[in-house]
Amino acid sequence: SLSVGGLTCRCYTMLAKQSSKGKAKPATCTGLLSGKTFFVDMKIDGGDVDASESFRQKLRNLGATLSTKFTSDVSHVLFKEGSVKTYDEARRRDIPLLTSGWLAALE
């Protein structure tokens, strides 16, 4: 299994084994993020372009619940070049700030 950002992907090892044997691997670990609520603040081009939607879809595919606002229900933040307010609030509340690389490791 693979532990990334406090979440364990048990199917990651299975996928790696299947890939090494030349078998087709499933697209995702469906339900892996079930019970987790994410707020996504992903920007590119120096923070000028919002890239959040494609990441939201990936999180949905893994079973996550998404919040359009940084509410008290948020358990994780997917973040890159986002708002300083988002960053500071996540740090203050001890909520994991995760990157696109973290998400890629789960897929």
Image: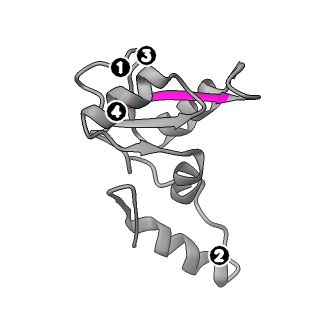
Secondary structure type for disc 4: helix
Q: Earlier in the sequence, mark 2 or mark 1?
A: 2
Instruction: State the quadrant of the C terminus.
Output: bottom right
Q: Give the x, y percent position of residue 2.
A: 42, 69
Magenta stretch, main secondary structure, is: strand
Q: Are marks 4 and 1 in contact (CB under 8 Å)?
A: yes
Q: Which numbered mark, 4 or 3, is in the foreground of this view?
A: 4
Gap in Å between the C-alphas at discs 1 and 3?
7 Å
For mark 1, what is the residue?
70
Q: Are marks 4 and 3 in contact (CB under 8 Å)?
A: no
Secondary structure type for disc 2: helix
Q: Earlier in the sequence, mark 3 or mark 2?
A: 2
For mark 2, what is the residue?
19
The dot on residue 105 is: none
For mark 3, what is the residue?
68
Secondary structure type for disc 1: loop
In terms of depth relative to the viewer, which is nearer, 38 or 63? 38
The three-letter amino acid code for the residue at tag 1 is: Phe
The three-letter amino acid code for the residue at tag 3 is: Thr
Q: Give the x, y percent position of residue 93.
A: 24, 33
Q: Which numbered mark, 3 or 2, is in the foreground of this view?
A: 3
Q: Is residue 75 found left or right of 26 in the rendered image? A: left
For mark 4, what is the residue?
90
The three-letter amino acid code for the residue at tag 4 is: Ala
